[in-house]
Structures are given as structure tokens and as C-alpha cells.
Amino acid sequence: MSEKVVIIPGDGIGPEIMDSALEVLNAVSSNLEFIKIEAGLNVWKRKGYAISGEDLEEIKRHKVILKGPIATPIERGMYKSINVLLRKTLNLYANLRIFKSIPGISPFKNVDIALVRENTEGLYSGMEFRIMNDAAIAIRLITREGSRRVIKFAFNYALRNNRRKVTVIHKANILRETDGLFLEIARKISKDYPSIELEELIVDAAAYKLIKNPEIFDVIVTSNMFGDILSDEVAGMVGSIGLVPSANIGDKYALFEAVHGAAFDIANKGIANPVGLILSAALMLDYLGMPKKAEAIRNAVMKALSEKECRTPDLGGKATTKGFTRKVLEYLS
């Protein structure tokens, strides 16, 4: 029986790197059926909306999505973030990002971090408004249930993947009610996992220690905006945001995507780095119960990256998107 996967190519370099990811997936598995849906800026320009209600319903009929980058306009009056819409509509409360040093590429040698970010609450919950023309207010929503489920996810991930420590990153010294609640729940949940150490770090100190001693981190769990900012910091430490895979997980649905954006400046030039989306596709195979195929993809990607001539320009090489993908396929064959 085939697994149905919704494919959203996205904007900018999205279609190019999606082609690479699908080639790699087809090389390791013949029982995946892809259902393509269009969403994003190009759709908005053509049709006046970024995603249709019909396509949202189609997504909800299936449990797994592989998504390319979708642009979010800064201008008022345009569509709001499709990424946030999907997370909230599908209740994808946990965002998992995996960071590992790669020899010859990463400026930091000892990074091996799984960062779990709450995905539906905090300052990104979309509750903000203007007071006349003189001020604006954003509401930082932290709930007991929202915190419980993402912290539980982080501890369960640590347990399943033989990781020994979960660091909860917060600002409870200042945000005593919201981050105080998040920290309170982390302390309570940690008691159910005696084999896993709980570490508490204020976000300022965490940003410093990530640079100073990255090897002390294992699994990180934090609120929405802190996780968004810190994950870009760690992406720089491993060499490029283009190397980082991510998964957005809920109780019923899972969405997999690269961390980087649409990169319109290099779209259609054939030089986009497909690693992040290919590794996200590997995470998807893990989720679908195909860990050996997922590991085969990861091994092939690492072997391809070890060859300097196979790296794309963002990694200091001259390879094309298709050239790098061909090398990955060679190592898979």
C-alpha cells in the first residue's frame, strides 16, 4: 500500500529543490504517491489568494506534507503567512530542527543539537493590533496545554534518540507569567523522565553558550520566537541555513520543510542548495516508519558534501542543484 504525501513546491527556489527531493525519494522508495498543491506568492499573483480553501481541505485529507519555502510578504494588505496558517490549521505544535556539524563546511566542529520549538503560540500566534496610529500591541499567548505537549514531545524525542539532556530556554526572570508557566511545566514533566537531565537557561545565556560551548547542548525546547531566532544562530554554526532540515509535528499531521526561505535572488539559476529539503524528506521517511531508507539518504548526502566540487555556491563550491542531486543519487545506487 502506497503512502500519500502532499507536495507543495512553494516560491522562489522551491520548485527546483523540490524536484531534487522527489528524485531522491523515488530512488529509495517506490511506494510513495505524491499529490501536488500550489500555494504562495505566485498563486496570489495569479489568483488573488495564496492558498485555496479546496486545497486546504485536500491537505487535511492526508497526514503528511513535504513543503518548499513559501514567501511571506512584509507589506500590509497582502496575505498572512501560509506557514503559520498551516501550522495552526493542522495543529502542528512541535517544530523540530536538526543541526549537525559537517566536516570541511561547519565553522563549529561539535554541534549535534535537536531544537524543539513551540509552533502555534507565543508572539507568533497572530494576535496583534493597532491602537489608532500611535501604537501597536502583540499578545504573547502561552497556555498550559500548549506548553505541556511541546515539552513532552522534546522529552520523548530525547528518549527515543538516546539523548541525555533537555535544555529549556526561557526568559522567566522578566516574563514571569508566560515563561514562568512554560518553565513550571517543564520542571513537572521532567520528573517523568528520570534518565534525562533537565537544564534551565535564560535565553541570553543560551545564545552566548551556543557559541562558546555548543557541545554542551543536546535537545533544546523553547517558545516560538526564541526558537525561531536561536535556530538561525545554530544554522550559521553548522555552515549554512541551507543544510538544516525540519519537521512540524502534531497529533494527526506532519509537515516537513527546509528551514531556509524562497531565495528569489537565485531562483531559476540552477544553483540552489537542495540539502535542507532532501534531509527534511529523510525526516519524513523516519516519520513514515522507513528509518533505513532515511539513513541511506542522510549517508548519501554527507558523502556528496564531502566532495568539494559537489558543493553548491553557498557552500563555497560551483556545483549546480542538479549536479549535487546526481551525486547523491550515485551514492544511493
Image (cartoon, rainbow, N blue to C red):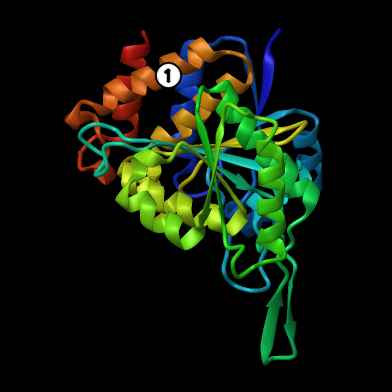
| Along the line of sight, the residue nearer the viewer: 257 or 171 | 171
**Quick check: 64 left or right of 298?**
right
- Indicate the quadrant where residue 44 lies: bottom right
Amino acid carrying label 1: it is Ile
Residue beneath the point at 66% across and 45% down: 186
In the depicted structure, whether residue 77 falls above or below residue 102: below
Residue for badge 1: 297
In the depicted structure, whether residue 138 falls above or below residue 151: below
| Along the line of sight, the residue nearer the viewer: 123 or 176 | 176
Count of residue discs: 1
Q: Position of residue 178 (x, y in %)?
A: 70, 62
Q: Position of residue 294 (x, y in %)?
A: 49, 18
Q: Quadrant where the C terminus lies?
A: top left
Q: Give SS at disc 1.
A: helix
Q: Is residue 92 visible?
A: no
| Along the line of sight, the residue nearer the viewer: 321 or 136 | 136
Q: Quadrant where the N terminus lies?
A: top right
Q: Position of residue 330 (x, y in %)?
A: 31, 14
Residue beneath the point at 49% across and 42% down: 14
Residue beneath the point at 59% across and 72% down: 75
Residue density around tag 1, few if under 14, some if 14–19, many if 20 or more, within 10 Å: many
| Along the line of sight, the residue nearer the viewer: 32 or 143 | 143
**Quick check: 102 left or right of 51?**
left
Q: Is residue 288 visible?
A: yes
- Indicate the quadrant where residue 242 lies: top left
Q: Position of residue 81 (x, y in %)?
A: 65, 57
